[in-house]
Amino acid sequence: MAEITIHRGTNAIGGSCIEIKSGITRIIFDLGKPLMENGGGEIDENNLNNPSIENKILPNLKGLYKNDKPDIEAVFISHAHHDHCGLLNQINPEIPVYMSRGTRLLIETGNVFYPESLKVHIKNIKNFEHWKPLEIGPFKITSYLADHSGFDASSFLIEVENKKIFYSGDFRGHGRKSVLVDNFEKHPFKNIDCLIMEGTTLGNNHKTIYASEADIENNLSGRFAIQTDIGFIQAAGSNIDRIVSIYRACLKRKKIFVMDLYTYYILTQLKQVSPSLPPHKNDNIRIYYIKGHSCAIAESLGASFLYENKHRKIELDEIMAKRKDIVLRLPLKAADRIAQKLAAQQKFHYSLFIFSMWKGYLDNDDSYEAFCKKYDLTMKHIHVSGHAYLKDLKRFCKALKAKKIVPVHTLQGEMFSDLFDNVYRYEDGVTFEV
């Protein structure tokens, strides 16, 4: 019998870590920094910055960490969000870490720009290809490209001891790759013994009036069409689906899309995986050089990248001259420095302020509302989740027809039995057989 242990994730969103064992071979899926305590409580920041098994930031996994004799065959990472990969610094460098090429590029880009506490250094890194099985001991593991706000994310089919286990990772069915969930319906797997499935959006904390990423693009396009002054938009630079939605809406309405070096550099790197991504020659993207970003690139990569893309650089004077044609996606502090100059030049005239991230961030950070109050702007929340809504969770379960469904990455595990068939719940650290 294969043995599965969810070390973290049965009653929390983020910090996922799953172990699957066959005989003496142990494989880990995800090793993320927790976002919360079990049950949703606030996590101790000091513990997070000093992870250990004792303070429960590190899952209790013998043979995984730096000071252990390695006893883990491999670690597989589903995507580059820190709640799935943020503890990789802690593992023994002899243990290989497998991930998609896009996930690796995102992690490496973060290491250029992030503070040291958020950098992820991996000594023994290996890439897999989606849909191409990889054999490790008795395991055959296949990555399936997932529709998620984390670029090039994976779900995993794990075959071992004549059993089939499917780990959803983080996924959705309403992003730019929604066809991937459609494909599971059209070409369903057979004989899935266990589905370990996320349930992030269950409950009321992820509701939105928008149904899909396409809706986001259309709404942005409509707003940009009637824009009479500069538009401010706050969105994660690593949420590539959202950046593409902004880009396409700007193109359609002939707006200049101003971004920072961090976002621009991510796009240039990920074009190695997806050449259709922006930027494209003679398009509408311009770059506002923030000193910290310029220094980070110069120190890590040399100054050539800055000079090669200088033709896209936009200065404050040009932003002020073309303000009604500008959509600005910069960190809030940089946006505020520009807004001060613009407000001194001329009072904002129905300027847009679009918050295009999870609304929960506003509960713990009042800087966005303070920005709007300072400049007399109305905030619009335009967002869809990076995680599957109930409709697509049900589609996914119906397509896979798993004999056993186990909740993970959720605060609403108790809801699963009311929504899906064949649900089995386990506490963190409890081993079960398949």
Image: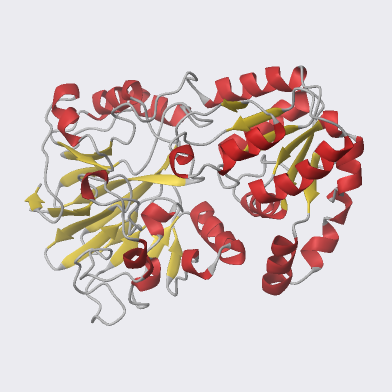
Q: In the rendered view, does 374 fall on the left or right side of 88?
A: right
- The spot of residue 402 in percent (x, y) is 18, 32
Type of colouring: secondary structure
- The spot of residue 177 in percent (x, y) is 50, 32
Would residue 123 be seen by someone viewing this image from the given angle?
A: yes
Whether 116 is drawn above or below 336: the answer is below
Q: Image point 28% across, 75% down: which residue?
A: 65
What is the count of numbered marks? 0
Query: Along the line of sight, which residue is nearer the eye, 413 or 197?
Result: 413
Instruction: Give the quarter of the image for residue 195.
Output: top left
Q: In the rendered view, does 296 fall on the left or right side of 61?
A: right
Instruction: Give the quarter of the image for residue 123.
Output: bottom left
Would residue 283 be seen by someone viewing this image from the given angle?
A: no
Whether 342 is drawn above or below 428: the answer is above
Q: Image point 28% across, 35% down: which residue?
A: 199
Query: Along the line of sight, which residue is nearer the eye, 121 or 183?
Result: 121
